[in-house]
Amino acid sequence: MGNVLHGFFQSTKAAMLAITAHGMRSALTTLGIIIGVAAVITVVAIMESLSTTITDQLDDLGSDMVTLQAHTNPEQEMLGQSNKLSYDDFLLLKAKTNNVSDMTATMRAFSLGTSVQYGRSNTQTQIIGTDSSYQRVINTYPELGRFLSESDDLRRRRVAFIGSSVAEKLNMPSDPTGEFINLSGDWFRVIGLAEKRGKLFGFDQDNYIIAPFSTIRSLNGSQVTDNIDIMFRPSKGASLDKIKAQMSQILRQKHKLSGDDVDHFKFVTAEKTKKQFAEITTAVTLVAGGVVSISLLVGGIGIMNIMLVSVTERTKEIGIAKALGATPQFILFQFLVEALILSLLGGIIGLAIGYGLAAMVAMFMPGDGGIMVPMWAIILSLGFTTAIGVVFGLAPAIKASKLNPVDALRYE
Amino acid sequence: MSQPVKDSVIVLKDITKNYKMADQLFCALDGINLTIKRNEYVAITGPSGSGKSTLMNVLGCLDNPSSGQYLLGQKDVASQSEAELAKIRNYGVGFIFQSFNLLPRSSVLNNVMHPLIYRIMTNKKREALARNALKRVGLSDKIESLPNQLSGGQRQRVAIARALVTNPAIILGDEPTGNLDSKTTADIMALFDELHEQGHTIILVTHEAEIAHHCHRVIRLVDGEVESDITNAIEEPKEFVHG
């Protein structure tokens, strides 16, 4: 045991000496690893903080929010069928479903198109018709003015609650409440400006206009059959599955679906969306990480190269060591430790640089700018560099340990 | 020769060594039979290319013979593992190379301490032993120098100190005075005499007749064969006087 420990200590010392004796060469060797690890850490850290930002934003949307949408499966679509959810469906559900805290219906304003005008400015946006409970389901709060009220809906008022991007694009005054905007010929008074949400995957989340459901419905007119989305939030502690089952039953009954018929609707949960986003970011992280991992591999080959050169260059030295009583294991270990120290050193420096780079990039990213390097990335990159040290150091180390003393000594 | 086996430190039986050079087999050692007893003082001479150095490499376990048996302290060298051979090189023999083979980037002290790295002892002890060995060769004032800052003779003495530091039973010197002036040669030979008196077995390769005659036994090699093996009549080494 003492023998092993002694060999370990002395060969490590010899390795350290060799590294410091060839400072420049050692630095250049580790450069490949440094760049590789730094790239991996930067990419992973950026992807990770991006995905955290996205998850946070999705949480803002309300991760327990559920959307019920009409759904037409491809088979039905080929038959020219198009399923819809009607306002009556919504009223029925609202009346009959238990354990739902807020429920709201939203409708696209088909007749109004997507164009909005204010003064000489105009822009494209999405126009949503909904009622006052939308605010609680979606967590949208006014920055200025107010959200839709029940009476707005009852009286079919032509009022609009607008997202901040709309106000910006239309060059509206900083307080746009009370101003009038034109939606394809119909004038709407702005009653409130929404709090800014920012961008999600580059999609502007503040580009929308919300108007009372009844107003949009009447403007859509009878030419278009209602198709609404229903959004709701389960009560605290209620089982979503039970709610879904109950709603499905009610709707299937109302739509007169028999046992074998597929549902005309589907539930979309934010949780599911979050999961999908998480899957996407993980995939992107893996692909990007994989690409930059190649640079790590190249760095590893650099280490092997230098180790091979080092063995050849120091053949005589190895011969002397062997002639004076160094065991093959000692030589093997010395070269292995040398490769290991070089790659680990590169790994640690790369980690620091990668962290710094990621922090710099994070300053230009949306969100709170916090940078997170996940533990797995640290362990993975350090583990990888260690593996590189062992794998690429092994061949030269074995070569060195097997040299015949006389042959090694004869080498000039 | 009929000395008891236990006294025989080195026994060579029909040792051959062949090199393959450009498709031609070159026979460096051609059936060497040799027995060297403990505390012998042997010179190996012969013209260049006669296989002196090859024989020394075999004796120092730095090279394997092509055939034949080599018993070192009653152990068959051929049956030793690489690790055991390393131990023999470290503990059993002290090898003084013709070309010194010092580490160019290490100080004199570190060079002399080098063999002790492979032994379990404190660094302090290593340094003390190395300083002592350097003192014996008269280089106490050069311990921090690098080999290339020394003269040929000084380097030779560092190499000798490195061979002495492990206190080996057998000291093998390949032309240990080949690079020295007559004064230093006399000093070094006095040192070998002293080591011999302390009980070390000493085997020197030399082409200098003076040195050879100084030793108690002279083995002359020609074309890889023992041409003559003469034990000098004088038992006690006379004072070495050069020229």
Image (tube, rainbow, N blue to C red):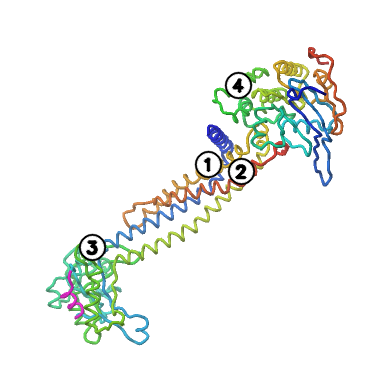
Most prominent secondary structure in the magenta stretch?
helix
Determine if marks 2 and 3 fall on one subunit.
yes
Write down the region rendered in magenta. Answer: A88-98
Residue topped by disc 1: A341
Label 2 crowd (10 A; few <14 / some 14-19 / many >=20) = many
The secondary element bearing badge 4 is classed as helix
Which numbered dot is residue B236? none
Query: Is disc 2 in the same subunit as disc 4?
Result: no
Q: Amino acid at mark 4?
A: Leu
Side of B160 relative to A268 (left or right): right
Report which residue position mark 3 lands on: A195
Q: Nearer the viewer, residue A354 or B101?
A: B101
For the residue labelled by badge 1, is the local secondary structure a helix, a strand or a loop? Answer: helix
Q: Which residue is mark 4?
A: B129
Q: Are marks 4 and 1 on the same chain?
A: no
Residue B46 percent coordinates (x, y): 85, 28
Dots 3 and 1 on the same chain = yes
Is residue A267 something that shows in the picture? Answer: yes
Comparing marks 4 and 1, which lies closer to the viewer? 4
